[in-house]
Each structure stands twice: as structure tokens, then as C-alpha cells.
Image (spheres, rainbow, N blue to C red):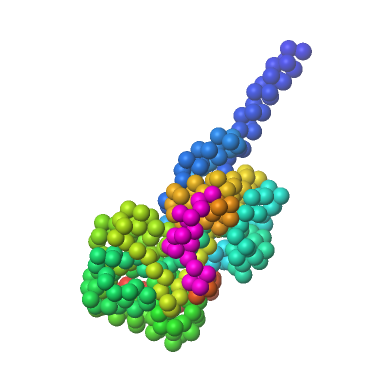
């Protein structure tokens, strides 16, 4: 009897430990893309520990997801990478019984062509690509991508070190789609970017550091994502943001679950938590990217709705396009981009 009692007591002690060992969610998100207090709140409310990891580009994220099956439960790809992950059969379908807060999502972000019926993805943040500019250095209207080639701004323009974004805005300026595979269009964009670089207009190609350098007044103009632009504007009121008349990119960063996720229900709990209006509001106010959450928008009120950087007009959005996956064509883009970067 004593032996059985000792065994039962031992099992009773081990079971909570085994359960708690499973109460984890492995999250892989962009740098500077969440209110970290939200992670603590999720842990406190659910008892699920968050292992939080960060990446800086979609391409880096994709490499890591492919190379490390089972390492991540929730990842945050942009829409064209969602399309690619689905094509590679790397995503689990989401059980929306566990994500009821998806009901707060803006209607125009539902059932996207990159993921019909949102079978695999939930919008997290969205925004545009445009031009952040310093009004003390730029007196003319900023209404065209063409200003990025203006030699009045020698060594005064930051470009994104991003193939899709920088090639994309150049293609739009020249009147083409950001998703084109037309060799004539792509060659024209490459030549236009080489011309810009050789003219001395480009100060640097960079990503995350641009916003702080614009706050510090280190350049007149920068190609920038709208959320980073709003961050910079909040710190330097001389800055303003514009979506050029030729059109631009509207993007959506999504929450998805890899097929190899070890903690799928915890992943769905985490996604549902981030879709809760008060949490979506906290994240929006922390990083100032556009929220897809209708109730969070109501909570923020006019401060949000009157802000055209975060809440662009329907006309501006209609003039933009999503990026689509070009993985089977990316070698061409990479080769053209290297010619631009290597140009002297």
C-alpha cells in the first residue's frame, strides 16, 4: 500500500509539471512590432508562457521557418509570403472556434485573394508605402515618386533596402504594376534606380534605422512604411507623409500558424488575444501601424480616424495594390537588384 501511495503522490506531483511544460507559445514577429506589456498580460491571463523571437525581413523569416520545423507556433508574414507559405503547404488552417475575435476585422481585409476566406491567416496590422519628408527641407508638393530622383536633393534621400518595395515604387512611378514580370518594365525600373544612385541623390539604402535618422533631420526624403512614418512624425513635427499620385503598395502583416506548430491551440489563443479590441488598441498605439480591428478604431476615436498616415483615404487605398508572391521569378528581381546595388 505504501509503495502505491508513494507512486500516486509522485505522479500527482509530476502531472502539473508536465502540463506546465506544455503551456507555451513560440512567437516569431518583426522587430519593434508589439507592445511588450501585452505579452506579460497574455501570460498573466492565460498562464501560457510566450517565447518571443524577432526577425527583420520576410525573406529572413521564410528561411528560418523552412529550416526549423516545429520551432514556431505563430509567425507574422506579409501577405505575399502568406501566399507563398500556402503554396508550399507550410500553414495550418485556423480553427475559428478558437479565434472569435476575428469578427472585429475590417471588412475590406477579409477574404483576400492571397488567402481566400482567411483559411490560414488573420490580419495583424496593415499600412501603405509612401514618402516621409522634412517640411523644412522640402518646399514643393510631395505628390509624385519623381521627387526621389530630383537632383535638388543630392545625398538627401533614403531608399528602402528592400527589393520589392524599392523596385515596386519605381515600377509605379513608371506606370507599371508592382507585380509585373514584363522584362521591359523591370529593365526600365532597374535603369531608373541606377540613374538615381549614380546621380548622387541616394544617401543610403536601409530599413529600420531610417525612421530615427529622419527624426534627427539627416535627410530630406525617405521611402517608408506608414507606421514607421507615424513614429517619426510623433517625434519630429517637421515631418509629413504622402502617398504619391502614381499609387503604391498596401500591405497586410498577418498572423499564421505553421503546420509543424507544436502548440496550435495556444497559438490560436494568442492570435485571439491580439484580436481583442483593447489589446489591438494597445498594440496600435504602441507601434502606430494601422489596425484592422473595427472596435479598436472606435476606442481610439478621432485621433486615429483623422490621421491620414494611419487612416488613408479610400481613394488613396484604391490606387494601391497588394504585392503577390513572385518566388518562381525572384531570381530575376534579385539579379536586377544586385545590378542596382553594385552600380558605381
Q: Up-down: is 78 above or below 300?
A: below
Residue at x 44%, y 52% (from the top left corner): 287
- Which image quadrant: the C terminus? bottom left
Extreme-bottom residue of the structure? 184
Q: Quadrant of residue 191?
A: bottom left
Residue at x 65%, y 45% (from the top left corner): 265
Residue at x 34%, y 81% (from the top left corner): 192
Q: In front: 239, or 252? A: 239
Whether residue 63 is visible: no
Residue interval drawn in magenta: 299-317
Q: Up-down: is 305 above or below 181?
A: above
Q: Quadrant of residue 113?
A: bottom right
- Which image quadrant: the N terminus? top right
Extreme-right residue of the structure? 1
Residue 159 in the image: state x and y as whole percent.
33, 68
Going by the image, does 53 lie left or right of 144?
right
Amino acid at each position: 500500500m505504501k509503495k502505491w501511495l508513494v507512486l500516486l503522490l509522485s505522479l500527482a506531483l509530476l502531472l502539473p509539471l508536465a502540463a506546465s511544460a506544455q503551456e507555451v507559445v513560440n512567437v516569431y514577429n518583426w522587430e519593434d512590432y508589439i507592445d511588450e506589456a501585452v505579452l506579460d498580460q497574455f501570460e498573466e491571463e492565460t498562464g501560457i508562457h510566450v517565447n518571443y523571437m524577432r526577425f527583420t525581413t520576410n525573406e529572413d523569416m521564410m528561411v528560418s521557418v523552412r529550416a526549423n520545423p516545429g520551432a514556431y507556433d505563430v509567425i507574422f508574414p506579409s501577405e505575399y509570403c502568406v501566399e507563398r507559405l500556402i503554396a508550399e503547404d507550410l500553414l495550418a488552417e485556423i480553427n475559428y472556434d478558437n479565434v472569435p475575435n476575428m469578427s472585429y476585422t475590417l471588412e475590406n481585409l477579409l477574404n483576400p485573394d492571397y488567402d481566400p476566406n482567411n483559411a490560414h491567416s488573420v490580419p495583424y496590422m496593415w499600412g501603405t508605402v509612401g514618402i516621409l519628408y522634412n517640411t523644412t527641407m522640402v518646399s514643393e508638393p510631395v505628390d509624385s515618386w519623381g521627387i526621389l530622383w530630383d537632383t535638388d536633393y543630392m545625398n538627401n534621400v533614403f531608399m528602402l533596402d528592400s527589393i520589392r518595395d524599392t523596385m515596386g515604387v519605381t515600377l509605379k512611378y513608371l506606370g507599371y504594376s508592382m507585380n509585373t514580370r514584363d522584362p521591359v518594365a523591370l529593365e526600365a525600373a532597374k535603369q531608373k534606380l541606377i540613374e538615381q544612385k549614380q546621380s548622387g541623390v541616394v544617401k543610403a539604402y536601409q530599413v529600420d534605422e531610417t525612421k530615427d535618422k529622419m527624426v534627427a533631420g539627416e535627410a530630406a526624403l525617405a521611402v517608408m512604411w506608414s507606421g514607421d512614418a507615424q513614429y517619426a512624425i510623433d517625434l519630429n513635427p517637421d515631418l509629413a507623409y504622402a502617398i504619391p499620385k502614381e499609387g503604391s503598395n498596401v500591405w497586410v502583416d498577418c498572423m499564421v500558424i505553421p503546420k509543424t506548430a507544436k502548440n496550435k491551440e495556444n497559438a490560436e489563443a494568442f492570435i485571439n488575444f491580439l484580436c481583442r479590441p483593447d489589446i489591438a488598441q494597445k498594440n496600435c498605439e504602441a507601434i502606430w501601424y494601422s489596425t484592422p480591428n473595427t472596435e479598436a478604431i472606435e476606442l481610439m476615436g478621432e485621433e486615429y480616424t483623422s490621421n491620414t498616415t494611419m487612416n488613408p483615404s479610400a481613394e488613396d487605398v484604391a490606387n494601391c495594390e497588394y504585392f503577390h508572391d513572385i518566388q518562381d521569378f525572384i531570381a530575376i528581381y534579385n539579379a536586377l537588384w544586385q545590378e542596382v546595388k553594385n552600380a558605381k
